[in-house]
Image: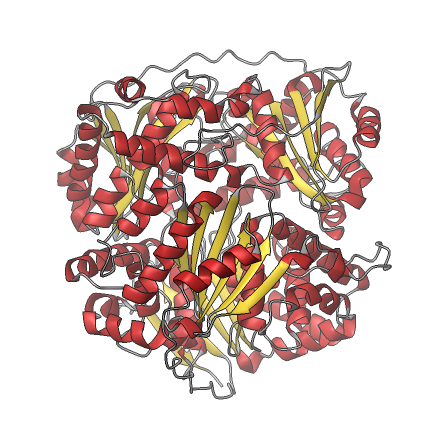
């Protein structure tokens, strides 16, 4: 029953997407050339600016087709929070040529399945289809990008669906609730403070016009990157992309996100009181963007601290001190500087202050003394095996290609990343620790049960800044 | 849960451990994929070993089982097998718990173990160059676990806390555990496979060590390795490492089919802070060898196994009452459960339950349209290759065949069998395997003060609290 509260797909792709040839392996060939089929990746850019990347892999007779759209909750403003995610739902709900629901009915009737997800930064549409349905899938993707329409009745019922998702993941979940509070507290200006699911009042009140405007602004073909992996050649895929997608006219790209987060000059704390048998403590440290050169070192640092039962913080807090039942961590990589999270689930009746003290001492030790060579090798090896596990599926390949192209600016960096991780030294990891683990740049969230008999009604959440 | 990304839908619920066969195109007649070439041999001590070379990436995946699991738990102490599984790698052979974890993770490997209804299973992946270490660690974990007192106490206490944590942050994940405990009652399938807060607290180190001493043995186990491996080297190394494993001393209890329930009753689990009602409806279904399996998979795909399913269409697409709704058949050596699960905001609990029951009524009453059958057939055939793509997938699939004693026909004949299913067969399995809406156990997790009256409309209600330390209303 192990739980990973903050595993995020985009984050996973990057965090665990890099390989290093392990210390024991002979270094005769560069790791990049050892990725089987890497020479089978080809790309082109359509006349309307949409980039298409194809990785042929004929292991199974299926194709994964992902459309990465560079829009997420980062592109929202108060009043329309959650709209990028809601819009993602509406992309399945009808065009001027197709009734709501036809997209799914037609795809499933030809053996295909699909899903989609929205993060702070991106919205990704995923289709998994038998090769024989490729033509249909291109036509369906083209239709919704060119002809999306909104049925007011469907907007209302989908609003209920999204609110149900929010109740499931946030309102009926202590983990989800605390995560939202810490994220919203960590940023004073940047839209990373906006929860991707949206604030309840906004879910209840966004309008048809908001959706129309959002579509026009963000769903330009030149704001999309199409990835195909599987039983398809680059020539076939490019021909279909030209036929179905190239006719969609290029548009003005969405305006850049102007706001940058001002420097944080003191620790922030948020205390949430909700009935909890197992109290929670989440720490969020200001961290660089996905394309920062220190990214690999930060990912290795987080792995050393929290990945697996032999990781430092697990060993210390769970096994030795018995102060926690679970420890987690992730470097949340996005277009803009974001957060590195450490999460602690405590046993019933635990003393959060004691946990914080032990944790702080451990982090101070990493900053002052660094990590051992064995810890670094272990983290690199964990990356290597995760990389190969992802490379083993068409789904994993499509995820990796998309995240490197979108967040690092070039899918080829996927094949360079093993070398990038190989180069990380103990000094680099220590520097990353010094950069990330700054008390003045963190937000600490604690969720505990309210006192037995509160003297006065306690607000659901309070935030305060502490110098 | 997933803190950053909000998905359009949760993963589709498909019939438990579906293993599907290959076909090249939805329109073409199903063409069977072959199980990859492999070697199967049995050591003199009864251990079955299967080796599947598949060299696309430099990993070796393993998947195996030791018969027993919750079935071998003492009836009054469910969770013993689960603690045994969890402790296999927390100290074994010459390594302490930390040394074992460090040995696995130090080379980027993984090792998982867990208890199911009828077995303890192990799985993981190592880089191919670490094959000798993999075999050493796996044989230590299975044959020489230490069950140190301190590790035992720590691990057991954490499992109790994890159940509390699930109640805090995702009560819906516990619905199948409540459902099975209430539906199967004293039958071994009713035992919570991970134990309950109460039962775990009563389990001792001696229970765990005793389980391993009597229930573990080479003759009860199968190990499958798939990936970048040299079969000759593996066979030699595995024979050496596992050749001395003794046979198990105990006979497993015989499993008899549990009866289906007649009539309808409701168990209401009070979660006072909840803003949604999480519901589960079920009855005893069919077993792994059910002859109508291809037809049943197609009907369940249409009813609750994919996005456009009848259930999801009514509860999500048309009404917006829920983020997701699905159904599944869990099939064991004897019949497991057919189950439906979904959720909706507290105020619309009755509306969602009414719709759910109506869909089942309609399924039982109306004939399927030929076009629906064709759509389901294309869907199941089109999606199965994604589940048999990697070495790890094949290791799991072959271990599964071995566990249930199913022939290769179970995989290789599945595609052609799906191709032959007609409307008469779908009608027959719908009548036979799906419960009538009047014969159901209904489990609700939600705010009892607001849904108590609604619940009573669906049958006699028994109430319990989410915070109770068992998965059934009255503790033993």
Q: Residue B163 appears in which quarter of the rendering?
A: top left
The location of residue A407, given as percent across then percent down, is: 55, 71
Find residue A316 and report its horizontal and vertical position in percent. 66, 58
Instruction: Name the side, left or right, on which A397 lies relative to B261.
Output: right
Residue at image position (72%, 48%) is B98
Q: Nearer the viewer, residue B210 or A251?
A: A251
Between A317 and B402, the one nearer to me in the picture: B402
Colour scheme employed for the rendering of this structure: secondary structure
Q: Is residue B169 visible?
A: no
Work out whether A249 lies above or below B108.
below
Residue A148 x %, y %: 27, 64
Quarter residue B453 falls in? top left
> At 67% across and 29% down in the image, what residue appears?
B224
Residue A327: image quadrant is bottom right
> In the picture shown, does residue B79 fall above or below B468?
above
Seen from the viewer's position, the closer of residues A365 and B387 is B387
Q: Say if residue A86 shows up in the picture.
A: yes
Residue at (70, 70) in percent of width and height: A366
- Between residues B195 and A358, which one lies in front from this camera angle? B195
Which percent across, then down, holds residue A267? Answer: 51, 80
Side of B241 relative to A147 (left or right): right
């Amino acid at each position: 029953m192990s739980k990973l509260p903050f595993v995020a797909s985009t984050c996973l792709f990057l965090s665990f997407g890099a390989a290093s040839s392990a210390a024991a392996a002979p270094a005769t060939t560069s790791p990049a050339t050892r990725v089987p089929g890497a020479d089978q990746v080809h790309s082109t850019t359509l006349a309307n600016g949409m980039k298409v990347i194809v990785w042929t892999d004929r292991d199974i007779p299926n194709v994964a087709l992902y459309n990465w759209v560079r829009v997420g909750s980062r592109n929202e403003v108060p009043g329309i929070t959650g709209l990028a995610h809601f819009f993602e739902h509406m992309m399945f709900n009808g065009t001027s040529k197709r009734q709501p629901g036809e997209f799914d009915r037609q795809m499933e009737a030809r053996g295909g399945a699909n899903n989609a997800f929205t993060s702070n930064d991106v919205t990704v549409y995923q289709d998994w289809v038998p090769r024989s349905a490729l033509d249909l899938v291109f036509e369906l993707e083209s239709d919704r990008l060119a002809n999306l329409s909104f049925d007011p009745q469907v907007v209302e019922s989908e609003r209920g669906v999204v609110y149900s998702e929010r109740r499931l993941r946030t309102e009926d979940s202590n983990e989800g609730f605390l995560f939202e509070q810490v994220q919203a507290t960590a940023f004073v200006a940047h839209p990373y403070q906006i929860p991707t699911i949206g604030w309840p009042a906004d879910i209840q009140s966004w309008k048809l016009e908001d959706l129309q405007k959002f579509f026009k602004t963000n769903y330009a073909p030149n704001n999309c990157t199409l990835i195909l992996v599987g039983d398809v050649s680059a020539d076939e895929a490019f021909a279909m992309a030209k036929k179905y997608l190239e006719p969609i006219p290029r548009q003005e790209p969405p305006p850049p996100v102007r706001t940058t987060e001002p420097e944080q000059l003191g620790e922030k704390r948020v205390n949430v009181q909700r009935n909890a048998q197992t109290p929670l403590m989440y720490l969020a440290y200001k961290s660089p963007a996905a394309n920062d050169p220190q990214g690999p070192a930060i990912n290795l640092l987080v792995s050393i601290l929290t990945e697996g039962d032999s990781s430092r913080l697990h060993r210390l807090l769970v096994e030795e001190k018995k102060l926690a039942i679970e420890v987690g961590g992730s470097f949340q990589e996005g277009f803009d500087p974001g957060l590195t999270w450490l999460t602690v689930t405590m046993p019933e009746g635990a003393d959060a202050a004691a946990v914080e003290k032990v944790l702080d001492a451990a982090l101070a030790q990493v900053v002052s003394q660094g990590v051992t060579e064995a810890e670094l090798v272990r983290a690199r090896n964990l990356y290597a095996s995760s990389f190969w596990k992802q490379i083993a599926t068409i789904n994993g390949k499509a995820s990796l290609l998309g995240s490197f192209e979108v967040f690092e600016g070039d899918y080829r960096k996927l094949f360079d990343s093993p070398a990038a991780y190989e180069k990380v030294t103990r000094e680099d990891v220590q520097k990353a620790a010094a950069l990330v683990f700054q008390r003045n740049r963190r937000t600490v969230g604690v969720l505990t049960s309210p006192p037995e008999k509160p003297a006065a009604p306690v607000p659901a959440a309070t935030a305060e800044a502490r110098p | 849960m997933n803190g950053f990304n909000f998905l359009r839908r949760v993963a589709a619920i498909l019939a438990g451990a579906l293993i599907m066969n290959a076909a090249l195109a939805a329109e073409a007649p199903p063409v069977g994929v072959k199980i990859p070439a492999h070697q199967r041999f049995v050591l003199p001590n009864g251990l079955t070993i299967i080796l599947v070379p598949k060299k696309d990436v430099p990993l070796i995946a393993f998947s195996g089982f030791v018969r027993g699991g919750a079935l071998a738990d003492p009836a009054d102490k469910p969770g013993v097998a689960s603690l045994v599984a969890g402790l296999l790698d927390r100290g074994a052979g010459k390594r302490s718990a930390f040394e074992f974890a460090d040995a696995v993770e130090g080379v980027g490997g993984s090792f998982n173990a867990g208890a199911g209804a009828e077995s303890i299973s192990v799985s993981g992946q190592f880089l191919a160059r670490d094959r000798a270490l993999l075999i050493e660690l796996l044989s230590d974990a299975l044959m020489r676990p230490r069950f140190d007192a301190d590790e035992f106490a720590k691990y057991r206490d954490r499992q109790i806390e994890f159940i509390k944590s699930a109640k805090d942050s995702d009560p819906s994940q516990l619905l199948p555990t409540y459902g099975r405990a209430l539906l199967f009652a004293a039958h071994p399938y009713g035992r919570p496979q991970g134990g309950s807060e109460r039962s775990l607290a009563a389990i001792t180190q001696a229970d765990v060590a005793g389980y391993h001493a009597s229930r573990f043995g080479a003759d009860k186990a199968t190990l499958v390795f798939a990936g970048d491996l040299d079969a000759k080297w593996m066979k030699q190394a595995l024979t050496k490492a596992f050749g001395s494993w003794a046979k198990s001393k105990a006979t497993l209890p015989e499993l008899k089919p549990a009866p289906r329930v007649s009539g309808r009753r409701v168990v209401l689990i009070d979660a006072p802070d909840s803003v949604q009602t999480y519901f589960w409806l079920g009855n005893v279904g069919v077993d792994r060898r059910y002859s109508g399996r291809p037809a049943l998979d197609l009907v369940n795909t249409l009813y609750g196994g994919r996005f456009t399913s009848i259930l999801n269409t009514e509860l999500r697409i048309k009404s917006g009452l829920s983020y997701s709704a699905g159904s599944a058949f869990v099939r064991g050596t004897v019949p497991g459960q057919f189950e439906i699960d979904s959720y909706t905001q507290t105020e619309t609990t009755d509306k969602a339950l009414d719709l759910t029951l109506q869909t089942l009524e309609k399924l039982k009453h109306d004939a399927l349209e030929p076009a629906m059958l064709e759509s389901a057939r294309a869907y199941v055939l089109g999606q199965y290759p994604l589940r048999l793509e990697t070495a790890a997938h094949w290791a799991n699939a072959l271990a599964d065949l071995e566990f249930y004693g199913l022939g290769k026909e179970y995989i290789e004949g599945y595609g052609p069998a799906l191709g032959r299913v007609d409307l008469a067969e779908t009608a027959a399995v719908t009548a036979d395997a799906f419960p009538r809406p009047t014969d159901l156990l209904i489990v609700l997790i939600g705010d009892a003060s607001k849904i108590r009256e609604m619940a009573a409309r669906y049958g006699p209600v028994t109430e319990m609290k989410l915070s109770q330390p068992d998965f059934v209303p009255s503790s033993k």
